[in-house]
Image (spheres, rainbow, N blue to C red):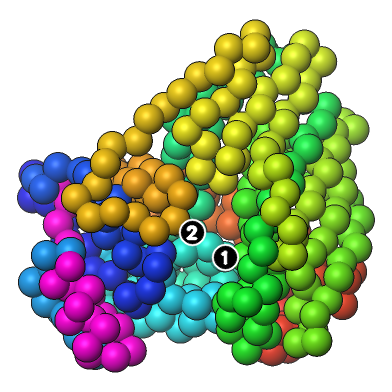
Amino acid sequence: MAPLRWAIVSAGTISHDFACAVSTLPATDHQLVAVGARGLENARKFAELHGIPRFYEGYEAIAKDPEVDVVYVGTVNNAHYEVSRMMLEAGKHVLCEKPLCVNRGQARALLDFARERGRFCMEAIWSRFFPSYIHLRERIGRGDLGRIERVEVQFGFPLTHVERVRMKSLGGGTVLDLGVYTIQVAMWAFQAEPVKIEAAGQLNDEGVDVGITATLHFPQGGVANIRTSAIDKLPNTAVIIGTKGSITLHDFWCPTELTDVDGTVRSYPLPTPKVECILQNSAGLRYEAEETRRRILAGELESPSVSHQDSLAIAGVQDAIRKQIGVEMPEDYIYKS
């Protein structure tokens, strides 16, 4: 079977780390063949560092490149829709960084278009492909935790200086940047969508949230308490609590360790990439790349681990939280849920 030929859109930090992660996978399965960035020099340097044969200024050339099978979209949040749609229209499969889009209406439009074009499209919620998440789901499925009653999850770093978080013009705010992780782990544990949402938040002078607290109520009485912060470093754990015990995911968005229901600490080491990653545990991006290959080879248009409905549900929760705390984006007036 020929390797899956990847192109990367944007040459920022997360794209760098994705390229590093792909380098840990067999070259017979995955190849990085092109990169596009807003500046040609940035694209050239990125290509040189990662051994990518072609580099382009802008993103249109990626869409026109006949040797690209799938595109990893690592742009700022509010460019996800436009760039992903461009690639889908050109016949490419898409793995798009989270949040998939700025709101649920926009996400629905993109996913409907992907299905119309017969192309795989997945929101890059890499967390769900870590062995820790798979182990958690297996435990829950076997009934080892009993009935899941509560999820406690906090996610925060000092990020108020980071443009993609603090600026409304880039689709900023912790609900979109960090909240997606807290929401998805709650849904992963309960295997359901929340039926009621209560939220409060703190906004900056740009009108985006720098911190939120929310309670998600699930069917049969389950509750998830979530907190995000761009001001404070938080514990960054997710504790899944059932009637028979609990599991804690450490560094829950990219966990290489968990404390199991019996108190055992389980570790899942990551391989060392050829070029050093910038962000924590980013070699784990390899798992979502491999899932993308697996589904494309099978002729599937989505992954059951991050299904289209999952992405729509997560976006719907984000919309509800933003509405309650008073954060509006330009896209909210264009794309209706």
| Left or right relative to 298: residue 218 | right
Q: Is residue 118 visible?
A: no
> Tag 2's secondary structure?
strand
Residue drawn where x is 65% and y is 8% of the image: 262
Q: Is residue 4 above or below residue 47?
A: above
Residue drawn at x 61%, y 21% is 259
Q: Viewed as shown, does residue 66 lie left or right of 149?
A: left
Q: Which residues are magenta?
A: 29-49
| Rendering coords of residue 183 (x, y %) | 70, 50
Q: Please, which residue is most extreme toward the top here? A: 262
Magenta includes 37?
Answer: yes
Task: Say if mark 1 contacts mark 2, CB within 8 Å.
Answer: yes
Mark 1: which amino acid? Pro
Give 275 or 23, whichever is nearer the viewer: 275
Question: What residue is rendered at 57% in x and 65% in y?
Answer: 99
Amino acid marked by disc 2: Glu
What residue is pinned by disc 1?
99
Q: Is residue 2 visible?
A: yes
- Mark 1 to mark 2 CA distance (whole Å): 7 Å
If you read the primary sequence from the N terminus, does the residue marked by circle 1 or circle 2 appear first? 1
Mark carried by residue 17:
none
**Quarter-wise, where is residue 247 in the image?**
top right
Residue 41 falls within the magenta-colored stretch? yes
In the figure, residue 140 lies in which quadrant?
top right
Q: Which residue is mark 2?
A: 123
